[in-house]
Image (cartoon, rainbow, N blue to C red):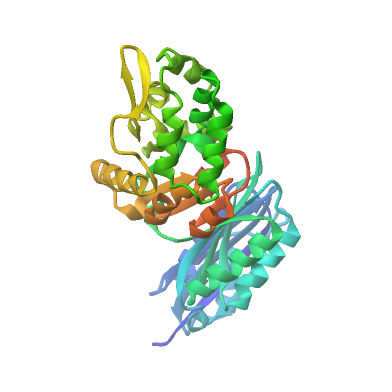
Amino acid sequence: MPRVSYLVTVSGPDRIGVGAELFAALARVSAHGGQLSDVAQITIRGSLVLCGEVTVDETVRAEDVRRALASCDIERDGISTHVERVIPDLALEGGRLLVTLLAPRIDAAHLEGIFRAIAAVGATCERIVHLASYPVDCYELVVRGSDHAALRETVTRVAQASGVDLAVQRAGLHRRAKHLVVMDADSTLLQDEVIDLLAEECDCADEVTKITELAMAGELDFAESLRRRVALLEGLDASVLDRVRQRLRLTPGARTLLRTLHRLGYVPAVVSGGFVEVLAPLLAELHVEYLEANHLEIIDGKLTGRLTSPIVDRAGKARALERFAAEVGVPLAQTVAVGDGANDIDMISVAGLGIAFNAKPVVREHADAALSVPYLDAVLYFLGISREEIETQ
């Protein structure tokens, strides 16, 4: 026998028991071979919209559904109901993507631009979740469409033009599976550049800055620039490493990010072009077990101006991420890389989700998502973790 579907919408002031009453009515409607097809609910400031779709034999009419609702006494205390016959065949085809929007404040004009972009490629938004309202605004949209490439390109262009940070990812249970989250240290986990602090200790800050500028101008690669900068530290007493470590400042939100990752069973790691001798004790205090960084050669309590192992450069960072993923036992699709510099590009590119954190334009071009806010824990929103979950002890 042919089947029909009815969408029942309950709206009005939220009150205890209204859900039970709706499902009691739908159970009566579907008692003879029917089934509940879909359910959705949203409550904003005490105002409820609750929808249930039931699929039944075509002999069941809209009037039968309305009588079932009346028998369960739903329409009281300001609650109203609406019954509409729907045609399942008109459902939009295509898979789902998660579009995460983040900015200091997201207003209606921002959302208008994003939703027009979604509609322009023939896609539609099925669900909106407000993940956070402070210290930043963040919304996650579940979007269905058949052309994911066009959707990604269009919404990214609109978001960049309006100053909204954006991530577009595939939907699925993998987002709540175990993840490895790998971060750069300097200017990502930390506000500081360790080599600059060391240079200040040996009064060679100007020389180090000049070498850094040559590297940024493309006249030196990272490995050579690091060797030249470390060479200027020759003769420095190793005790300065402790002083430099005490001067390090974590990026706002770093402790919250690490605490939340640990609580949810995710694994944090640091892969840095900096130095193990400075970073390892700090990361031990933060309970970060996975670290890949350069080693300073120390003889008789003095820095020799040399490194004792292969340099952790752009390619080395990507290899470290892959090795850590294998050790932790997660596929690359469940890895996240966060960085700000050109030597993070390979790591960001190989990760399942690459995030450019207050990064240079060339890094943003290679990343899946970009953050321009100063809070490192905003990374959690791109994992679908709400502010409420972050603050749950």
Is residue 190 shown to the viewer in this render?
yes
Q: Is residue 87 above or below residue 317?
A: below
Vertical arrangement, residue 246 with respect to residue 183, above or below: above
Q: Can residue 191 be seen in this view?
A: no
Which residue is pictured at 41% across the width and 48% down the height?
A: 336
Rendering quarter of residue 329: top left
Quarter of image, res 9:
bottom right
- Closer to the camera, 87 or 190? 190
Where is residue 150 drawn, in percent x and y? 53, 74
Q: Check the picture and name the quadrant holding the N terminus.
A: bottom left
Residue 311 rendering spot, x and y as whole percentages: 34, 39
Above or below, comparing residue 240 to residue 23 in the picture = above
Compared to residue 38, the image places residue 55 above or below, namely below
Q: Position of residue 30 (x, y in %)?
A: 44, 71
Task: Report the residue at 40% width, 15% height from top.
Answer: 238
Find the residue positioned furthest to the bottom: 1
